[in-house]
Image: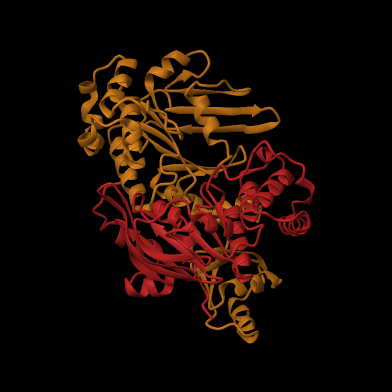
Amino acid sequence: MIAHTHPYPAIEVKALSKSYGEVRALDGISFEVGRGELFGLIGPDGAGKTTLFRLLTTLIAPDQGSASVDGLDILADYRRIRQRVGYMPGRFSLYPDLTVEENLAFFAALFDVKVRDNYDLIAPIYRQIEPFRTRRTDKLSGGMKQKLALCCALIHRPSVLFLDEPTTGVDAVSRNEFWDILFNLKAKGISILISTPYMDEANCCDRVALINEGKILEINTPQAIVEGFGETLYALSGEDMFGLLEAARRDKEVRRCYPFGETHHLLTSPGFDPRRFAEALTATGFCGVSVRPVEAGIEDVFIKRMGNG
Amino acid sequence: MDDRVISVKDLCKDFGTFRAVDRITFDVHRGEIFGFLGANGAGKTTAMRMLCGLSYPTAGSGTVAGFDVMTQGEAIKRHIGYMSQRFSLYEDLTVWENIRLYAGIYGMTRRQILRRTAELLDRLHFRDEIHTRVGRLPLGWKQKLAFSVATIHCPEVVFLDEPTGGVDPVTRRQIWELIYEAAAGGTTIFVTTHYMDEAEYCSRVSIMVDGQIRALGSPGELKTKFAVQTMDEVFRMLAREAKRGE
C-alpha cells in the first residue's frame, strides 16, 4: 500500500494550527499521508477540512506548526508545491464563460504542459464529458462540472491530489462512480487526500482521519477504527420507532440511544441485559421489539468520540 | 375528512423540448413524513419548485395546502414552510432578528411572534443565544434554527431541501428528532436527502428516475417489493436504470 522507495511521505503535517479571529479552525493537528496512499478526512462542515486543504496547497499560512507536501515545506517552498499538486476546491472554481475544452487548455497553459502530454491520465474521465467539449462550463450539469474540475486538477500529472468534498450533494450512485475514478488514479501512483462528510465513504480509503471542530479524533485504517469501538453495540427495532427511542433513553442501563436507519443503536452500561430490556419494552406495550448486537460502523465511532460516550 | 395536504395528478414540466418532470402523481397526508428521493438530475428540484408555488406546471393538476398548483402559486408560498440546504438564514442578523424577519414576512402578529419565539428558544435550548449573530453559530445550530424558523408560522406543510447536508452525525439525528416532533404535532413534512439511512425515518418515500416516480411506498413496503435489506439498495437498483444524463 505505501511504497518506501521515496524518501518523503506525500504529506507530513506537524502540530498545525490556524485561527480566524476567535475561531480556532485547526487546533494542533498532526498526520502523515504515505506515497500512493488514498487518505480520507472524514468530518462535518466546520471541522477544519477546507482550512487544512488551503494550508497544504499554500493558499494561506499557518499560525503554528509546520507541514510539507512531497518533501517541500509549505512556507519556504510554496512555489514548487504549487507546480506539483492538483487541487479541486469544494466550491466549483473553473471559468463559467469558457467552454469545456477552453478550461482544459487554460489549465494546461498555466502549468506549461499540453493537454495531450498527460492525456492517458484524464482520458477515462474526459471521454465522459467530451461530447460537450464546446459547451460553456456554466451550462454543464453538476456531475459534468465535477468531472471537468477533476480533469483540470490532473492536467499536469500532479504527485499529490487534493479533493475537498468532491461528493457532497452527489447521489449515491454517482458517488460510487467517482470513487471508481479515484481508485484508478491511485493505481497510477497518485497520492490522494480527500475530504467528505459521508461517513460511509471512509471504507473506500486506505486510512482515514476522523476530524471534528479542528481536532483529529482518530487516525487509522477504516477496519481498525471500527474494531477499536471497544464495546458491544445493540440495535433496537420494533413498531413505533419514535416511541422506542424515548423509552430506551429512559432506561438506566442505556447510556445513549440514537436513530440509525431502520434501527436505533444503543450504547449501554455493563449491567445491560438485552433480553430483560426487550421484555420490559414489550411489557409497556411496544410490539415486535427486537434487541440484538450489531457491528459498529465508522459513524458509530464518530458519534461515540464526539460525545465522549 | 380529506387529510391530503399535497395531492397532484399527472404533473409535468417542460423546458422547451425537454420534459424535466414527467406525469408525477401522488398524495401526501397530514402529519406524514414524505421522503422525496432521486438521483441528481432526476427532476426533484423542478418538481419541488412547482409544489412550493415557485413555478407553474406545464400540465397536470393538483393542490398544495388547499391551493391550486396551476394558478395559485402566491397563495401556496404564504401557506407553506421552506428550508433550503444553505443560505436560509441571514448570517449578519441575530437569532432574534432572523425570527422576527421571517415571522413578519409570514404576516404573524407581534403577540404570536413573541409566543412562538419563546417556545422555539426553549425547545432548542437557545435562550442565551437570542442576540448572537447567526453567522457565529456552529452549522448544526444554524440548521436546527433554520428548521424552527421554517415552521414558526405553523404551516400545514414544510418543504425541507437536504436539511442535513454536511452536518455532523449527532446534529443530523437531532434535526430528525425535530422533524419527528413537528410531524407528531400535525405538521406535514416533505423532505429530500442523499442519506439513505434517513429514508428509513420517513413514513413513505418516492423515488424519481428520469422525471418519473418509479417507486412509492413505506420503506418496509419498498424493501419487500425489491427483495432487499436496505433503502440504499432500493435506491441503487432504481437509479442505475436512469437513461437520462444529468
Q: Nearer the viewer, residue A263 or B206?
A: B206
Letter of the chain shown orange in the rendering:
A
| Residue B173 visible at all | yes
* Visual hue assigned to chain B: red
Q: Residue B78 is drawn in which quadrant?
A: bottom right
The answer to whether A304 appears left or right of A175 in the picture is right
Vertical position of residue A46 compared to residue A234: above or below: above
- Figure quadrant of residue B125: bottom right
Q: Nearer the viewer, residue B179 or A21?
A: B179
Q: Position of residue B53 (x, y in %)?
A: 48, 55
Q: Answer with left or right where residue A163 lies relative to residue A147.
A: right
Residue A111 x, y percent position in the rendering: 33, 16
Near-viewer residue (A15 or A7): A15
**Residue A165 at what x, y percent from top left?**
45, 39
Task: Please name the residue shown 44% across and 20% down the image.
Answer: A71
- Is B204 on the left or on the right of B15, as rendered? right
In this view, the residue farthest toward the front is: B71
**How many numbered dots are placed on residues in this image?**
0
Q: Quadrant of residue B95?
A: top right
Q: Is residue B228 left or right of residue A258?
A: left
The quadrant of the picture occupied by the N terminus of chain B is bottom right
Give the vertical position of A36 relative to A203 (above or below): above
Q: Is A288 above or below relative to A249?
A: below
Residue found 76% across the figure and 58% down from its top: B122
Mark yes or no: residue B194 visible. no
Q: Nearer the viewer, residue B7 or A247?
A: B7
